[in-house]
């Protein structure tokens, strides 16, 4: 984000870390309920799109790091520089904006890299025209493979619907993936709860803080979607969205509400984990202090007896008793055993 400081609005600066020389795969899908055509190429110098009459068109662009490509797309489809600026900003807050001839949507895709055991965040943007959908990802990703397969094999209603339904399907796929992230976070929190309850180590507490930081990042990426989806009911947006997908958008909004509520619930559980850690640590410390207190209680009278008869004054009574030593040992044993029985009866031991 610091790359853009001081520049005028609409300046096209890619804020990500992908090498600008990395090739960008571009795939164009032209389809209807009778036929399907797929064109795949790598962007080098030219960008072209062949829009066919009576066909829905989806152009999937797997890269936003080439500013020349983004400029050419902007020129070809008359996309203003402010939208292109948001498109190139991979830290852009999820939002929906309306223009005269298109709507622009950007949001975050979150995937779990199991090999590295970390979450990866990628900006995904969509530009919906009345006869065309452009999608932009930061890098190639297989999360939309199921939708592509449905188009190629004419499965379900996707091929018979317009591009607005395709837009819904792509957003819904991203949202469905959020549920997998939520499940994974919940499993990690449950494991931390068990670990803290049994062994509240310093490492476990550090894991809680790391988990909480990750959850905050997830919340920041997902929370704005509630506002984004609510804008689908806007009159200007309705020019690009058909009424027959309204029920799907309502379902999508319900999913986002559930996800946000789940994140809030997990966030509260993270706070409870911190309290549980301190409580468990405090309870363990109390147990240690309890044992030390009982040991002290047992040995205080014994130390008193040993101290009295260890003074060796000349005229102390009982010093000349033949069995005095054994009597003191018996008294010490009785005090020791009595104290143990008393503690056990009180269930303190």
Image (cartoon, rainbow, N blue to C red):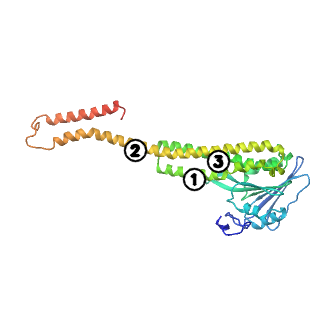
At a point 26% along the width and 35% down the height, the residue shown is: 336
| Disc sitting over residue 285 in the figure | 2
10 Å crowding of disc 1: few (<14), some (14-19), many (20+): some
Judged left or right of residue 231, residue 201 is left
Vertical order, 348 against 85 (above or below): above
Residue extending furthest toward the front: 235
Which badge, 3 or 1, comes first in the chain's sequence? 3
Q: Which one is nearer the viewer's eye here, 21 or 301?
A: 301
At a point 36% along the width and 40% down the height, the residue shown is: 290
Front position among marks 2 and 3: 2
Q: Which residue is mark 1?
A: 213
Judged left or right of residue 262, residue 141 is right
Query: Where does residue 320 sit, x and y in percent of width and height?
Result: 9, 37
Which badge, 2 or 3, comes first in the chain's sequence? 3
Q: Which residue is mark 3?
A: 181
**In which image quadrant can residue 316 be found?**
top left
Secondary structure of the residue carrying tag 1 is helix
Vertical order, 329 against 282 (above or below): above
Q: Which one is nearer the viewer's eye here, 108 or 232?
A: 232
Using the rendered image of the protein, determine whether residue 145 is visible from the camera's viewpoint. yes
Query: Where does residue 282 sit, x and y in percent of width and height?
Result: 43, 44
Secondary structure of the residue carrying tag 3 is helix
Q: Are marks 3 and 1 in contact (CB under 8 Å)?
A: no
């Amino acid at each position: 984000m610091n790359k853009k400081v001081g520049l005028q609005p609409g300046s096209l600066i890619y804020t990500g870390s992908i090498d600008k020389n990395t090739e960008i795969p571009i795939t164009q899908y032209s389809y209807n309920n009778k036929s399907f055509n797929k064109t795949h190429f790598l962007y080098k110098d030219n960008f072209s799109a062949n829009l066919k009459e009576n066909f829905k068109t989806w152009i999937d662009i797997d890269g936003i790091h080439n500013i020349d490509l983004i400029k050419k797309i902007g020129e070809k489809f008359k996309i203003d520089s402010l939208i292109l600026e948001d498109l190139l900003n991979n830290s852009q807050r999820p939002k929906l904006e309306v223009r005269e001839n298109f709507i622009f949507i950007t949001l975050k895709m979150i995937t779990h890299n199991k090999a590295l055991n970390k979450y990866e965040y990628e900006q995904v943007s969509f530009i919906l025209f009345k006869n065309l959908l452009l999608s932009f990802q930061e890098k190639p990703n297989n999360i939309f493979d199921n939708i592509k397969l449905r188009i190629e094999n004419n499965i379900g209603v996707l091929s018979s619907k317009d591009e607005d339904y395709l837009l819904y399907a792509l957003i819904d796929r991203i949202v469905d993936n959020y549920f997998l992230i939520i499940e994974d976070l919940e499993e990690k929190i449950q494991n931390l709860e068990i670990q803290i309850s049994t062994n509240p180590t310093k490492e476990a507490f550090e894991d809680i803080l790391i988990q909480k930081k990750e959850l905050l990042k997830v919340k920041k990426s997902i929370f704005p979607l509630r506002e984004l989806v609510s804008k689908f009911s806007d009159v200007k947006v309705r020019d690009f969205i058909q009424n027959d997908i309204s029920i799907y958008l309502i379902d999508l909004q319900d999913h986002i509400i559930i996800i946000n509520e789940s994140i809030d619930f997990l966030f509260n559980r993270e706070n409870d984990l911190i309290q549980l850690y301190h409580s468990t640590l405090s309870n363990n410390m109390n147990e240690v202090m309890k044992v030390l207190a009982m040991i002290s209680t047992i040995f205080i009278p014994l130390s008193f007896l040993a101290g009295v008869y260890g003074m060796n004054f000349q005229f102390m009574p009982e010093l000349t008793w033949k069995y005095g030593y054994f009597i003191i040992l018996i008294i010490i044993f009785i005090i020791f055993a009595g104290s143990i029985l008393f503690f056990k009866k009180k269930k303190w031991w």
